[in-house]
């Protein structure tokens, strides 16, 4: 009896732990979906005025409208775009009617068109505030000679271009942009893998429990075989 009780307890406890992890992922999935729905709702809100002191946490994804003029100061951030391939994100300085200098992500510019003539009009812009987290230990230093950066590091970009540490991801503009394609914010770039994790944990629980039953069955069969007269 003790011989089977130990592996049975081990199997049941392991199964319960794996089921608990799967259930936790299901709960996190519901929380993440609610969070993403909130982000999508905020992105699609009617645009407001730019806050006096935008906060990277409280004002992330805030929909705003700016009126003013591009100054012509820009930095190209090397990136890639679905359907385009290698491209540059064009980060431009925009001076508002209130004489505030902010950064605007005008969208993607294909590598082959980098040398094309650029336009810096007076315009009304609509978009969302964002402070992307794109810098890690593997991010190369900017190539200042080529005016090429490898991440949208808002504080560093603002320091280099002498603007507020504020980045507007362009969604719409009153003046058509002939050289860059706006790439508006949405929640699709935020990972949500909790369903896959839940399926993995529940599958492991089923395998663990099945292997436990199989092991007990093998033990029971071995005991019956050893107790039979033919085994003597």
Image (cartoon, grey):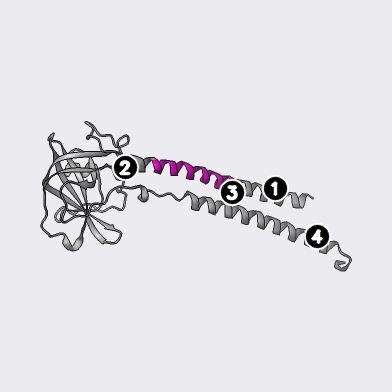
Q: Position of residue 223 (x, y in %)?
A: 80, 60
> Magenta region's main secondary structure?
helix
Nearer the camera: disc 3 or disc 2: 2
Cα distance, mark 3 to mark 1?
14 Å
Tag 3 and tag 1, C-beta contact below 8 Å: no
Nearer the camera: disc 4 or disc 3: 3
Q: Which mark is residue 9?
A: 1
Residue that numbered label 3 is attached to? 18
Left or right: 16 as drawn, with respect to 61? right
Residue 148: name its quadrant: bottom left
Upstream in the sequence, badge 1 or badge 2?
Answer: 1
Residue that numbered label 2 is attached to? 43
User: Does dot 2 land on a helix, a strand or a loop?
Assistant: helix
Dot 4, crowdedness within 10 Å: few (<14), some or many (≥20)?
Answer: few
Q: Position of residue 225 (x, y in %)?
A: 82, 64
Dot 1, crowdedness within 10 Å: few (<14), some or many (≥20)?
Answer: few
């Amino acid at each position: 009896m003790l011989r089977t009780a130990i592996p049975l307890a081990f199997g049941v406890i392991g199964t319960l732990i794996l089921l608990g992890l799967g259930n936790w992922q299901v709960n996190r999935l519901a929380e993440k979906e609610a969070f993403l729905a909130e982000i999508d709702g905020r992105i699609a809100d009617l645009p407001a005025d730019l806050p006096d002191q935008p906060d990277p946490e409280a004002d992330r994804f805030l929909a705003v409208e700016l009126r003013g003029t591009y100054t012509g100061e820009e930095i190209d951030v090397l990136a890639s775009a679905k359907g385009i391939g290698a491209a540059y994100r064009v980060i431009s300085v925009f001076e508002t009617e209130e004489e505030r200098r902010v950064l605007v992500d005008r969208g993607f510019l294909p590598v082959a068109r980098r040398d094309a003539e650029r336009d810096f009009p007076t315009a009304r812009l609509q978009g969302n505030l964002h402070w992307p987290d794109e810098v890690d230990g593997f991010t190369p230093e900017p190539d200042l000679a080529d005016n090429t950066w490898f991440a949208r590091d808002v504080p560093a970009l603002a320091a280099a271009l002498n603007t507020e540490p504020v980045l507007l991801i362009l969604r719409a503009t009153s003046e058509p942009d002939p050289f860059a394609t706006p790439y508006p914010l949405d929640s699709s770039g935020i990972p949500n893998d909790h369903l896959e994790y839940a399926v993995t944990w529940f599958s492991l629980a089923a395998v663990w429990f099945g292997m436990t039953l199989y092991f007990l069955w093998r033990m029971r069969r071995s005991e019956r075989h050893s107790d039979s007269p033919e085994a003597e």
